[in-house]
């Protein structure tokens, strides 16, 4: 049994910090595909520039200045934490393997934090930068009822509708859908649509028709969606994706490693390790998102 000294704790903290970093970077969350990460420098950020898409014009007299729109919204950073207590006895007995597992779980919790924020937005259908709900009839990106169920034919129609979007000046937006998001109940239907060599909706004489949707989109499956029938199509190829993750301080590893002046050690014989972040999430470009409720 080794004595738990300040040197031992500094070494353990450095090891745990490295384990946390590796674990955090190794776990791919859905948010990394669907959201743009925007660094924040203050408590609240204002997004007055969303919706302004510059286009080239003939330069006849003077430049036509593209300013910020009068409408927009703000995202306020919130504080978040996750903390674990490690018994001093576990450190004395050099139970490094068990400590590593707990730190990896902490890293996983930090990564899942962003997925939870993202799906709280998707399920809550927040107000977009123009004052209208992200998914709305006014945006022509929301379909309900039995006719919105996932099928190859319906997915093809949604992709065509998104690609047909125009800028206010009549220029095409050149939207290129990249991702299909479904709940677990639709995973195998989605895989059949995106992976089959033959057209999934065809039967009889048309059963051997080529599936033009094969490999067209990246499939994302998440149990965090609110219903078992909805599905979403996103264009995540742009600088601003359909959703925004605002980072003031990314999840960072912290520890109370002082042996002699540590209240937790004195009262409970435990060392505390944790993660702290300041961040939040919000809607990005509604034009790059389309939702079908499926029922």
Image (tube, grey):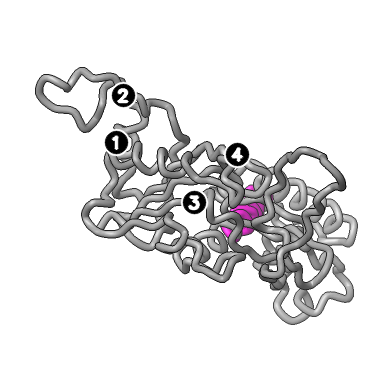
Q: Are marks 2 and 1 in contact (CB under 8 Å)?
A: yes
Image quadrant for the C terminus? bottom left
Q: Which residues are magenta?
A: 96-113
Residue at horizontal 33%, vertical 42%? Answer: 187
Residue hosting label 3: 289
- Please report whichever mark, 4 or 2, sits nearer to the chain's N-terminal start: 2
Measured in 3D between alpha carbons, the distance from the residue under mark 2 to the one under mark 1, in whole angstroms, is 9 Å
Residue hosting label 4: 237
- Please report whichever mark, 3 or 1, sits nearer to the chain's N-terminal start: 1
Residue 177 located left or right of residue 154 = right
Measured in 3D between alpha carbons, the distance from the residue under mark 4 to the one under mark 2, in whole angstroms, is 23 Å
Tell me where residue 110 sits by quadrant. bottom right
Measured in 3D between alpha carbons, the distance from the residue under mark 3 to the one under mark 1, in whole angstroms, is 18 Å
Residue hosting label 2: 211
Measured in 3D between alpha carbons, the distance from the residue under mark 1 to the one under mark 4, in whole angstroms, is 22 Å
- Please report whichever mark, 2 or 1, sits nearer to the chain's N-terminal start: 1
Crowd around label 4: few <14 · some 14–19 · many ≥20 (10 Å): some
Residue hosting label 1: 152
Crowd around label 1: few <14 · some 14–19 · many ≥20 (10 Å): many
Residue at horizontal 42%, vertical 56%? Answer: 140
Q: Label the magenta part by its dominant secondary structure.
A: helix
User: Does 230 sit above or below residue 160?
Assistant: below
- Please report whichever mark, 3 or 2, sits nearer to the chain's N-terminal start: 2
Query: Residue 40, percent across and down?
Result: 79, 61
Residue at horizontal 83%, vertical 58%? Answer: 9
In depth, the one of 229 and 9 nearer the eye is 229
Query: Residue 60, percent across and down?
Result: 82, 41
Crowd around label 2: few <14 · some 14–19 · many ≥20 (10 Å): many
């Amino acid at each position: 049994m080794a004595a738990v000294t300040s040197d031992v704790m500094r070494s353990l903290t450095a090891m745990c910090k490295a384990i946390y970093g590796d674990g955090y970077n190794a776990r791919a969350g859905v948010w990394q595909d669907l959201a743009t990460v925007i660094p924040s420098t203050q408590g609240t950020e204002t997004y007055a520039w969303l919706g302004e898409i510059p286009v080239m014009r003939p330069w006849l007299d003077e430049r036509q200045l593209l300013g910020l729109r009068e409408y927009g919204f703000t995202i306020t950073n919130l504080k978040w934490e996750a903390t674990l207590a490690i018994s001093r006895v576990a450190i004395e007995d050099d139970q490094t393997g068990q400590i590593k597992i707990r730190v990896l779980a902490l890293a996983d919790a930090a990564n899942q934090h962003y997925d939870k924020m993202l799906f709280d937005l998707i399920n809550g259908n927040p107000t977009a930068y123009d004052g209208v709900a992200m998914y709305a009839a006014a945006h022509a990106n929301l379909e309900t009822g039995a006719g919105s169920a996932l099928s190859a034919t319906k997915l093809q129609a949604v992709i065509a509708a998104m690609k047909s979007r125009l800028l206010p000046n009549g220029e095409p937006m050149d939207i290129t859908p990249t991702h299909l998001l479904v709940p677990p109940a639709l995973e195998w239907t989605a895989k059949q649509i995106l992976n089959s060599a033959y057209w999934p909706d065809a039967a009889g004489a048309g059963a051997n028709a080529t599936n033009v949707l094969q490999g067209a989109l990246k499939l994302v499956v998440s149990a965090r969606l609110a219903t078992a029938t909805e599905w979403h199509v996103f264009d995540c190829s742009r600088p601003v994706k359909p959703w925004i993750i605002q980072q003031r301080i990314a999840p960072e590893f912290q520890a109370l490693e002082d042996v002699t002046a540590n209240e937790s050690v004195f009262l409970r014989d435990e060392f505390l390790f944790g993660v702290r972040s300041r961040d939040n999430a919000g809607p990005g470009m509604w034009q790059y998102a389309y939702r079908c409720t499926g029922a």
